[in-house]
Amino acid sequence: MTASERAIKWSYMDHWRSNGPSGPVDQWHSHKTMSAFLKQIKATGFDAIDTFDFRIWQMYGDYGGPAKYQQVVQDHGLERIVNTFHAADYDLRNYAPHLPETHEFILEDFRVTMGRWSEIQLDNIIVMPATLYYDMEPVTEDKLKYTAECWNKVGEITAGYGVRLTCHHEFFSGIQSEADIDTFYSYTDPRYVSLFVDTAQHCIAGVDPVALYNRHAHRVSGFHFKDTRNVATGDDHRHRPDSEIMAPTTGKWFYEMGTPHGLVDFEAMMTAVRDNGYRGWISVEHDKANKQGGDYSESTAVSRWYAKNVLEEIYR
Amino acid sequence: MSAIRWAYAINQWKPQFDDFVRREEHERALKTISIAGFEGVELTYGTGRWEPLGNPQQLAANFGSVAGFREFLRSCALDGVSSWYWDPAERSMEHLTGPLSPLAEADVPAIVDRARELATALAELGGSVLLVRPVPGAGDVEPLDDDAIGRVAACWDAVGRATAEHGVRLALHVDFLSALRRDHAPRLIDRTDPALVGLALDTGELTVGGIDPLAVIATHGDRIAHVQFKDALAVDDAQEYLQPHAHWTVRVRGGAREVPRWFAEPGANGGLVDFPAITRALLDAGYAGWIVVESDQSPHPAASALLAGYLVQQELGPMVHEQRKAAV
C-alpha cells in the first residue's frame, strides 16, 4: 500500500534532543545533527514531521527559510512539514485569550506568524487556547466565551492562509476539564476553530480522550498520540510556577505510546479514528522523553513500532 | 540472484556484564531493531545468569525454552536469530569449563560439542551461521607455525562438520587482535574444507587491522559465509595488537592513543569504511546470506541502530534490490 493509498499517515512532532560530545544538544545545533535526526525519523517509517513556530528563526538563519528547510526534510525521504505548534508566551499583561484587552496583540501575532510561514503549506497551526490554569482561574463562562471569540478571529486569519487553527488542551492550561472544553467549543465557530486531541494531556486531566474525540470528531483536525502513566492529582494542574516539568508529584508526565503501564487506550483510540472515518495525519509525540534517563531515539522507535505493529492492524 | 538478508547485532546494548539483563530492555532493543528495518538479530555468546541471551541454557532459563525465545522475537516483529558469535576461549559457567583452545587437540572434542549445542539452538531460532573466534589474540599465543595452522584447521573442519548437520554454516571471524591478522588468515582458510568452513567478513575489524575488506572479497569472495557491517573510526597502525592482553589494553582501553571508540555503526561521522563499494563487491562476488549490521560499541544504541537502518533502507538495500531485479 503506497502512502497516497493509506487513510492514515504518520508525522513526528519534533521535540527531540541529539547527543553531542559535551552532552545533549538541540537537533537544530548543526546541519549534521539535523540530518541525523531526520534520518532516524525516516528510518522508523514516519512520513513527515511537525515542528514548532519558534523554529522559524533557525529555518531562516540556517537554511534560508521554511521552504528551503522543508526541502532538507524532503531530501531525507520525508514528505513535508504538516503542522506547527505556536508556543506563545502567555501573560496577563498582553497575551491572555480570556482578557479581551489583549486580543489585538494576539491577532497581530498571528498576522505576522502566518506571513512568515506562507512560503510552505501547513495543515494546522496548533495552539494552547488558554493561559496557564492559575492565570485563568476561576474559569467562568464569560472567560470561556472571550477566549472563544479570540480564537474565532485568529482562525479567520489562519484560514486566509489555508491553515486550520486548532486547539490543544494541556492539562495545566485554563481549559482542560471536560465541561470547560465542551463549553469552549460551543462558543467557537467550526469554520475557524478545530480540536487537536492530545491523548496524554487529556488522560492526565482525567478526561477520556476517546470519548472526547467521539463527541467532537467533526471538529478534530489532528492528534498527538502519546502516553502517560499518571493522572494529575491535587494542585498538579495549577502548580506555580510550572506544572509540566515541576509538579512535585510527577517528575515525568509523558511517555511514548507502547510504554508499559501507559494509561491511554490506543487501540480504542485507533478504532474510534477508523469508525469516525478520519483520513489524514496522526502526529506522534513524546515530549521530554529524555527526562529521567529516557532516550529520544528509542522512544521514537518504540512508538513507531507500536503504530506499525498494533495500530495499523486496526486502521491504516 | 542475490539473497541477502539484513540483521542487527545485539552486542552494542551490553557494554558491561551487569547491563541489559531485564526483559523490558530486550523488548525495547528488539523493537528498535525491527522498526529500523532489520529482520533478524545476531547474538553474542555469554555465560551465567546475567547473560540471558548468551547461550541456550540461559535462553531456556529466561524464556522457558529456546522456542520460547523465538516466540519472544516474533512478538517484537523479528523473524529470528541470524547468527551467534562464540569465542571458545570464553568460559562456560553452565558446563563448568574454562577456556578452550583450538590449538590444543585435547580441547577439540569439547569445542565440537559446544558448537553443536549452539548450532542446534540456532537452527531452532531460524539462524544459519555460527561465527567463531578461530584463534586467540596475537599477543596471547606463540606465532602460528604450519603445524599450529594445521591443528586449528582440523579443529574448525570438525566443528564445521558438526554444525552442518544442523544446517548451520561455520564462519571464522578474524578480529583486529587476532593471531591470524595479515597473512595468516589466508593460510588457515586455504587449509580448511570449503564445504565446511567459511570466512566472516567484518568490515570494521579488517579496517582497524589495516586490511582492505575489498581485497579480502577479491581474493576470498567465494569463501565468505557471513558478513558484518560495522564502521571503523581508527586504525591500529602501530601494531599494538601484538601486545599481551591486547583485548583490555588496546580494544577496550584504546591503546597508547586511548582511542575512545574503535567501531561505530555504518555511515557514522568519521567512519573509514566505504559501504556502498563493499556492498557492490559482495553482489559482484555473488554473496548470498546475512549481512549483520553492528556498531559493536555505542554510547547511544538506539540512535546507532536507526542511523544504520536509514543507510540500509535508503542506499544499501536498494543496491541489492536493483541487482535482484536485473537478475530476473
Image (tube, rainbow, N blue to C red):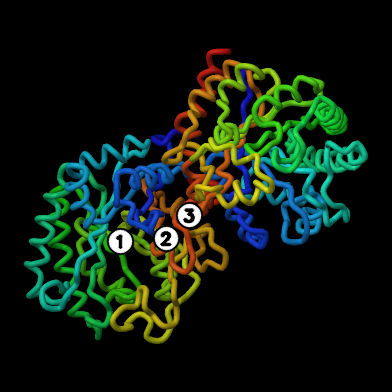
Provide the residue designation for mark 3. A270
Q: Residue B169 is drawn in which quadrant? A: top right
Provide the residue designation for mark 1. A195
Q: Is residue B256 above or below residue A186?
A: above
The 10 Å Cα crowd at callout 1, few under 14, some 14 to 19, many 20 or more, is many
Q: Is residue B292 above or below residue A16?
A: above
Q: Residue B195 is drawn in which quadrant? A: top right
Q: Say which element carries label 3.
A: helix
Residue A130, percent from left and from top: 23, 72
Chain at tag 1:
A
Q: Comparing marks 3 and 2, which lies closer to the viewer?
A: 2
Q: CA distance from mark 1 to mark 2?
A: 19 Å
Question: Disc 3 residue type?
Answer: Met
Q: Nearer the viewer, residue B242 or B133?
A: B242
Question: Disc 1 residue type?
Answer: Leu
Q: Is residue B45 left or right of residue B234?
A: right
Q: Are marks 1 and 2 in contact (CB under 8 Å)?
A: no
In the image, which disc is placed on residue B130?
A: none
Chain-order first, disc 1 or disc 3: 1
**Residue at position x 15%, y 48% in the image:** A161
Chain-order first, disc 1 or disc 2: 1
Residue A183, percent from left and from top: 27, 73
Q: CA distance from mark 3 to mark 2?
A: 18 Å
In the image, which disc is placed on residue A286?
A: 2
Kindly tell me whether residue B221 is visible in this rendering: yes
Question: Disc 2 residue type?
Answer: His
Q: Comparing marks 1 and 2, which lies closer to the viewer?
A: 2
Q: Are marks 1 and 3 in contact (CB under 8 Å)?
A: no
**Residue at position x 51%, y 59% in the image:** A268
